[in-house]
Every structure is written in C-alpha cells, then in structure tokens.
C-alpha cells in the first residue's frame, strides 16, 4: 500500500505538472501571438488619407471611422487617420461632399541616393561645375533654403551654426509663440516624428546640406525632417506638411532630393503654393533610367539629372521635364558626425542646383523665381543635341557661363595681353542682366594714377574726386538681359577714343545697384593696356 500509495502520489504529481506545463506553454503562446501579431495589427489599424478641400469649404459631416484629423496650417488640406476597416466607405463619403476637391491615401516616397560604387573615381564635382565662379556671384548671405529631407546634423557645429533660427519662437518655453501650429519650432520641425527636433538620424539630409553649404556657405538652412527616426522613406502627408511649413517661414529655395512613385494632388497643390509664394523648387529627377519621376516632373519644379563626366549617369532618367544636369556619381559629402563619405544619386545633383539658386538670390534678393530659373537655364553648358533635349535638358550646371549671364560685365575686343593702340577707337560691349527691380547702372574707368572716372548718360567723363558718382542709366522692371555696344558701331555713344589718354594700365568697371544702393551683383572689370 505504502509503495503503491507513494507511486500513485508521484503519478498524480507528474500528471499535474504536465497540465501546468501545458497551460504555461499555451499562455506563453497566446502572449507571444498577442504581442507579435495582434499588437502590431492594432498599431497598423489606421490608414492616413489627405483630403483637399475647395477654397473656403468646410468638411462636414465627418464620416464614421475617422479616428483623428487636422488641417495643415496655411493650406486647404486635411490629414486624416481612418480605421482600416472603414477606409473605402470613408473615402466614398468624402468624395460625395461638395466641398471636397480630392481624396487620396498617403503614399510612401524615398530619398534619391545610393552609396558610391567601388572602383569609381571620385568626382571633383566642385571643379566640374566651376564652383568658384558660382561663389563669385555671392555666398548666399541670409537666403533661407528649406531642405525637406531626413533633417540635418544639428550636433555638428558646422551645420548648426548655419541652421535657420525662427525669431518668432522662444526656445524651450513650450509655447507656440508665433502661432503657426508648431510648439518651440525655433530651428525647424520633425514632421515624421512630430516634434521640434529635426536632428538627422539617417545621414541623407546632412549629406545633401553639405553640398548646398559648399556653394552657399552663408545661407540659412531650414531643416524639415519628414522621415520617422532613421528611416530612408517618408509619407506624402509629411512631405505636404513640410512644404507648407517651408512656405510659412519664408524659404526662398526648397530642395526636394526625393521622389514619389505616383503623382499626388496634395503634393502638387503644395508645390504650386510654394511656387506662387515665390519659392524656387528644385527636385531630383530620380535614380531610375526611365522617365523623370514625380514631383520633379511638375512644371513648377526644376528637375535635375545626374552626370558621370559629360554623359548621363546610368541611373539618370530622361524626358521633356528634364531641365538641368549636374555631377551625380561618387560625390564627396559630409555625413553624420562630420564623417566624409561618397555617394551617388540625383539627390546631390539637385543640391548643387539649389545651392546655385541660393547664390543668385544672395546676389540679388529682388529676383523672381522665374528669373532665377531663366538664368540657371541660359547659364547651362549645352550637351547632346543643340538646345534643350530629353536627355540633358538645358545642359550642365556651369559656373563660368552662369556668371557671365547673371552678372553685369564689360567686354573689350580680344587683344593679346590686353594691349590697345591709342590711335584706334575702341569698341566696348556691355551685358546687363535682369534685376526685377528698379536699378542703376554705373560705368567707370580706373586710370594708371588710380583716378576713377565715371561715365554719365550723355557720354561725358567725370573725375569721382570732383563729382559724386552717378549712374549712366536707370532701368525699370520688367527688365530683361540687355546686350549691346556702348562705344563703336551702332553703340550708345559714337566711340571711345583713347588718343588723348596717357599710356598705362586701365580698368573698366561696371556695377548695378537697387534704389537703396545695394549692389545687385559683383562689380566686374575689363582690362586695357594703352601704348
């Protein structure tokens, strides 16, 4: 009995242990399934949509199934989180409302770059585009460029010192001081994570910014982060809100080194709003050798493709929307932590054009976006078929050509060593770029004894030590480029006759100012050695 009893007791315990074990396993499996499957499903049970309203329209009623919504500040676009189970019904109900222009699901976009490939020679992109000539236009002082990307490395002083500071906000007081809908956005905003810290965790935005700052070191970069965390993708909803945010803070240039697979009415509306507000929008053409991708394909966007030498990079798209080309392979960049990296992609080609646009605005803040675009196009180096084509657009970004188009200058006939005879009248040509503002044109000659002589509108010369400097002409907008002969056949004045001048080295100078006497570009010089 005792042994039997003991044995029976052991059997009962073993059986109970098995039951407990089974229950534990089952509970573990339930918890595992719940946290591994149910919870993620719960987290993903909503779908975000973008509702574009007609002007002055009010969204009413709100369909059942809408979890949350908010109107993007400064726009007529509503972001809406909708229960996944009700999405089709909600979209149908919204489209039936008279005040609704369009409804679309928020899509996923990507940033246009890839690591530099082994075996490729590093691109000296700054030299290829003649960056020194671009920087001669201006260093981009004070111009705000919005980099809508993965943020920038604000922990690096080289970037943080050039970041835009929102003067309407008081940092750290947890108050929306400027009333724009974003609390403490004193240095930009993180749309992806919905906070005021646009610190880059991915690297792409910092790398793009390093290109812009190489050309426009005195500009102000407005970092607008649209990805979540360190992700290399973003939602079109965050992109749209980022564009309107850039408009609200007065960005003159908006850099979009990104693409979206399909057209978006909401994104299109935001970009048109930016363009109408006067911003220059520059976009990557894409890293797919097919057609130019959206939003670079929009008329309002300067689509930039990538070059490898003077040929299109293997990833560069084509099409009638292609506008400019710039180096795009094995580009030297600065990434997170100040680390030097190399990467390829139209992201960086795009940034080169953005930086150049910033310098044009730094040269002349009165320039309209259409004028800047025209200067960029006419200042490109033609490649491929003569004129604009589907492969190269207007051609390659070229600082030397752009400078000659965008800055006023005087041209004397070509002579070896600038040597001219005093016995022969000299033809002098001038180029005056568009200014989009009333502007004064000054022309002077610096003589061998360092006396500055200036020319008046009647063709008379004056000693600046005796007569205050005065313009040769006032120009009123709308203005276009003016090219002509100042002295010589069919010129404004009959001739420049050096017969009575002493021998020596002379410098011709030309400058332009606005009504407040601000220079609208560099003073340029032409040289003449009389004998």
Image: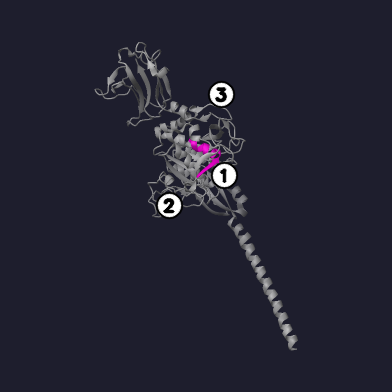
Q: Which residue is mark 2?
A: 183
Query: In terms of secondary structure, where does tag 3 sit?
Result: loop
**Label 2, residues with CA under 10 Å away: few <14, some 14-19, many ≥20:** many
Q: Are marks 2 and 1 in contact (CB under 8 Å)?
A: no
Point out the tag, 2 or 1, that comes first from the N-terminus. Answer: 1
Residue 317 lies left or right of residue 517; in this view the side is: right
Closer to the eye: label 2 or 1: 1
Closer to the eye: label 3 or 2: 3
Residue 258: x %, y % from top left: 54, 41
Q: How far is the residue under mark 1 from the one under mark 3?
A: 33 Å
Query: In terms of secondary structure, where does tag 1 sit?
Result: strand
Query: In terms of secondary structure, where does tag 2 sit?
Result: loop
Q: Is residue 364 visible?
A: no
Residue 64: x %, y % from top left: 58, 54
Mark on residue 498?
none
The magenta segment is: 340-353
Q: Which residue is mark 1?
A: 110
Q: How far is the residue under mark 3 from the one under mark 2?
A: 52 Å
Mark on residue 386?
3
Q: Are marks 1 and 3 in contact (CB under 8 Å)?
A: no
Q: Residue furthest top?
A: 423
Which quarter of the image is occupied by the C terminus? top left
Q: How many marks?
A: 3
Choose top left, top right, bottom left or bottom right for residue 285: top right
Is 132 inside the magenta-drawn segment?
no
Q: Is residue 134 visible?
A: yes
Question: Front-most of 499 and 185?
Answer: 499
Is 352 inside the magenta-drawn segment?
yes
């Amino acid at each position: 009995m005792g042994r039997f009893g003991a044995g029976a007791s052991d059997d009962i315990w073993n059986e109970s242990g098995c039951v407990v074990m089974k229950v534990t396993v089952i509970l573990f499996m339930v918890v595992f399934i719940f946290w591994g499957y149910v919870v993620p499903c719960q987290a993903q049970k909503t779908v975000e949509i973008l509702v574009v309203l007609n002007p002055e329209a009010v969204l009413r009623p709100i369909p059942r199934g809408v979890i949350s919504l908010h109107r993007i500040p400064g726009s007529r676009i509503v972001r809406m989180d909708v229960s996944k189970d009700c999405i089709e019904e909600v979209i149908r109900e919204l489209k039936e409302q008279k005040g609704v222009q369009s409804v679309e699901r928020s899509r996923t976009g990507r940033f246009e770059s890839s690591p530099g490939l082994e075996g490729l020679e590093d691109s000296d992109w700054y030299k290829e585009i003649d960056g020194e000539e671009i920087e001669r236009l201006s260093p981009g002082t004070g111009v705000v460029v919005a980099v809508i990307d993965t943020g920038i490395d604000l922990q690096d002083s080289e970037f943080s010192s050039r970041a835009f500071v929102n003067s309407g906000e008081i940092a750290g007081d947890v108050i929306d001081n400027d009333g724009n809908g974003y609390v403490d956005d004193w240095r930009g905003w993180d749309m992806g994570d919905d906070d005021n810290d646009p610190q880059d965790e991915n690297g792409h935005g910092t790398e793009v910014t390093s290109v812009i700052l190489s050309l426009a070191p005195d500009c102000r970069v407005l970092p607008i982060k649209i990805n979540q965390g360190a992700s290399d993708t973003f939602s079109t909803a965050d992109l749209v809100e980022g564009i309107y945010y850039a408009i609200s803070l007065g960005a003159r240039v908006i850099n979009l080194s990104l693409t979206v697979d399909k057209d978006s009415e909401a994104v299109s509306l935001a970009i048109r709003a930016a363009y109408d507000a006067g911003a220059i929008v520059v976009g990557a053409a894409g890293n797919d050798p097919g057609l130019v991708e959206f939003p670079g394909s929009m008329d309002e966007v300067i689509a930039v493709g990538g070059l490898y030498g003077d040929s299109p990079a293997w990833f560069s798209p084509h099409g009638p929307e292609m506008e400019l080309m710039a180096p795009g392979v094995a580009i030297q960049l600065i990434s997170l932590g100040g680390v030097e990296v190399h990467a390829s992609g139209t992201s960086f080609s795009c940034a080169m054009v953005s930086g150049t646009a910033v310098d044009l605005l730094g040269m002349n803040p009165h320039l309209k976006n259409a004028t800047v675009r025209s200067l960029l196009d006419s200042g490109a180096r033609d490649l491929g078929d003569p004129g604009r084509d589907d492969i190269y657009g207007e051609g390659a970004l070229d600082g030397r050509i752009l400078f000659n188009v965008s800055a006023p200058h005087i041209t004397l006939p070509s002579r070896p060593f600038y040597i001219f005879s005093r016995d022969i009248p000299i033809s002098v040509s001038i180029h005056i770029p568009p200014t989009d503002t009333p502007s004064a044109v000054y022309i002077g000659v610096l003589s061998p004894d360092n006396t500055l002589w200036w020319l008046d509108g009647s063709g008379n010369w004056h000693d600046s030590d005796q007569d205050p400097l005065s313009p040769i002409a006032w120009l009123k907008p709308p203005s276009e480029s003016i090219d002509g002969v100042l002295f010589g056949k069919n010129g404004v004045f009959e001739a420049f006759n050096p017969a009575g001048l002493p021998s020596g080295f002379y410098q011709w100078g030309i400058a332009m100012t606005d009504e407040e006497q601000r220079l609208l570009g560099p003073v340029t010089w032409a040289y003449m050695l009389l004998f």
